[in-house]
Image (spheres, grey):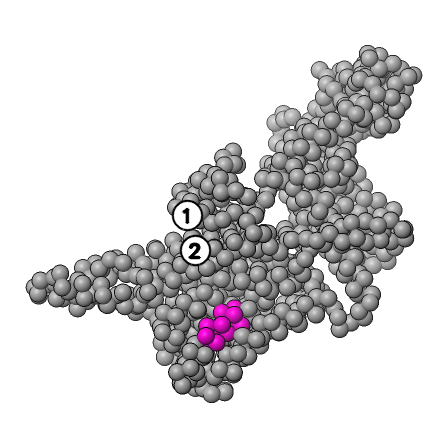
Amino acid sequence: MANTTIASFLNQTTASPETCVNVANYFCSDKGIILPIFVEATWPIALRAFLYLFAMLYCFMGVAIIADVFMCSIEVITSKTKTISIVKPGTDIVEEVEVRIWNDTVANLTLMALGSSAPEILLSIVGIIKTGFKSEELGPSTIVGSAAFNLLIITGVCVSAIPAGEVRKIKAVKVFAVTAFFSIFAYAWLYIVLVLNTKDVMDLWEAIVTFMFFPILVILAYIADKDYCSRRVDVEKETDHLELEYAGMAAELKPGHVNKQSVSEFVKEISKYSGGKLSPEEAAKLAALKIQENEKHDRSWYRVNATRWLVGGRKVSVNVNNSLKEKLEGSQVYDKAKNKDEVPLIIDSASDLSQGGTFSVVEFSASSCAVMESQGTVEVSVLRSGRTNTRVPFRYETIDGTAEAGSDYIPQKDVLVFEPGESMKNIKIVIVDDNQWETDETFFVKLSVDPDSGAVLGRKSINEITIINDDDPGVLDFTKPSFIFKESAGIASVPVQRTKGSDGVISVKWKTKDMRAVNGRDYVGGEGVLEFQHGETEKNIDIQIFDDKDFEKDEDFMVELSDAAGGAMIGRQRRTVVTIVNDDEYNGLVDRVLTIVNVNMDHLQLASSTWGGQFRDAMNVNGGDVENATTMDYVMHFLTFGWKVMFALTPPVNFLGGWLTFIVSLMGFIFLLTVIISDLATTFGCLIELEDNITAITLVAMGTSLPDLFASRTAARAEKYADASIGNVTGSNSVNVFLGLGLPWLIASIYWEAQGEKFAVPAGSLAFSVMAYSICAILCIIILVIRRIVPAFGRAELGGTPSLKYVSSGLMASLWVLYIVLAILETKKVIVVPL
């Protein structure tokens, strides 16, 4: 097409000297299949280079968005389930449960890997077709450059992305070992076929073997996942049990079918923790967040979510403000989300320690305390129970509430150690006395432990510290004008707060007064005295309520405070109404919450099931959730609006089980964009006189891998294990070679074999790039192994102490820079390596 364009231009042009100069300077017009569309002979080279670079970056955005659609179809395909019948252990009861048809490891190495690596794989195939089945550099070099970026940069970012004091391990170690081996072997194999065996020629059998390594990798990884080489019977039972357990949970939490009993228990527990202050909407948001945290997310989920954060699309995560999230994190509901095969990070009580003394339980002695501003310091005690004969380090840090670090207290973040036999440690925090009257202010001290230390957190892992006004015994009143308690709760705990001071011992009288509820029939009323010790800021009046099992309307009674002693005063909220809600009424509340949860979960589905929904998501910023849209969402939505609307034409994912979306997005949009990117990259490199392999390992490799970077970072922070963040990197790198190079080389080898010739693949810079990457990859894997086995690194691939995790990340980033520099120097013949 490019030659036709030049000829057309020459036929239409006069033979003036100025025009001839422009035609003579019209180079780099024969590099593409589609581009250039226009005659660019009169355009300045600098302008052309800028336009091609801008267009290439813009196309990378388009690839990320259509890859979002592609990954949604893969998620639908791989999440298919089947119903099987099992006998409940220890009983004769037969239950029906849903199990996934696709094995996770197989899905990750086939469709998931294809989804994240489709641009690189198609780029190599397009390159072969574009050159008439001859070898080219852009596609293969992009695959090697992308592998380097994925393994060295993405892994390095994930290592340091983990919050301070936390670690993430790879759970499927045997699968990771298989994929890690193949991620190095694949590139070593390339060096063998390019240099050591029939140099510069790709024999047909070499291409076949390269391609066949792909199914071999999948089979070996599957064997490692199922652990068929170990004690098969016990392992299979355990594996099958875990798969069924997960499948049952997934079915229970399916959008639109959230289990009512689970929601009821959640509402009950979260209401206790928050004092009944949550609205149905807030409870539903927290329930949806808990469901999302409990759900098992694969790489496609994180890839889709990362892309939508980048381009201002509809998010697939629950938006909850910090105060609500703190309620969830502080409640025992959050703690029960841990897998039973994992060392728990938080334990509700000593009874949860099934092994009795296996772990050290670390927690505060109280969940709150108060300190006078003039006192200068406050001490909070940390207790250790359970196993006390080991050395246990723990971390603590202060967190702002209404009190601000620096102006109200001196922030702290440190590590303390329980030596063998020690059961208590004190944390001293400096309080700033600014000599100005202020209302009571609060801040928090939070504990954390290393899961590998043999310690877990108790229920009191957060201590709320209140800084109170000096020399004032305080004001007593109820925290709110009314409280609601379920009839079957047994006890109504009505909180009384002490504000504006907590100096000395004070007391207040209370008494009940019948309204629709009758003392002795519906509750045990009367009167009493509530006493506050020095420093205490909140206490409860516990009133017994009766459950008569009869259907009744709501019943209520009043509690009133009077006669404060010890210098205290009674505040404005001296009376409160306690409403006893019938269980049927409570069930109505649960139903309302359940309905809202189902709506929220429906919104969290990855893709819309209709074309109308797809266009609504595409044409509205943040998918229509304008309330939570940021300025950057608006900017990126404006920039990518055209791509979004165009790709909304893709068939919805519920058509033909996701396969129609899969085919149309891959073979239609992604393939077309890959052809355009190939034209843009080769022409841009030509315009600035940059070799294709340098363009490939830098611009193209980074452009296609950036969504994976953000996805892996998010997965590293959100998941309990490192598999979803870095465990898939090695498998993807292997698949890139076996599919991305094996398939096009197999096609070209067959073509040239039919012509009676050999497929020539000059080793050159590609072989050197492969060798340099292989060395860097081996060093990176060694770093991960060291981190896994050395206690100083936390015995985990990700996270650990800040200094060592940043050192690890720095080393990996340095390896990537070294690889890029060496590859460029070799291409420019600054260094010459005999191959």
* Span highlighted in magenta in the image: 736-747
Write the residue at 52% across / 70% down. Answer: 739
Write the residue at 73% across / 39% down. Answer: 259
**What's the residue type where badge 1 is placed?**
Met
Judging by the rendered image, the residue that carries numbered circle 1 is 646
Say which mark, if any, is on residue 669: 2
List x then y, in percent, for residue 777: 56, 72
Write the residue at 32% across / 61% down. Answer: 34
Number of marks in the rendered image: 2
User: Is residue 164 shown in magenta?
Assistant: no
Question: What secondary structure characterizes most of the magenta part?
Answer: helix
Q: Earlier in the sequence, mark 1 or mark 2?
A: 1
Work out whether residue 753 can be spotted. yes
> Dot 1, how many residues are within 10 Å of its Cα: few (below 14), some (14-19), or many (20+)?
some
Q: Is residue 213 above or below residue 241?
A: below
Q: Is residue 736 above or below residue 92?
A: below
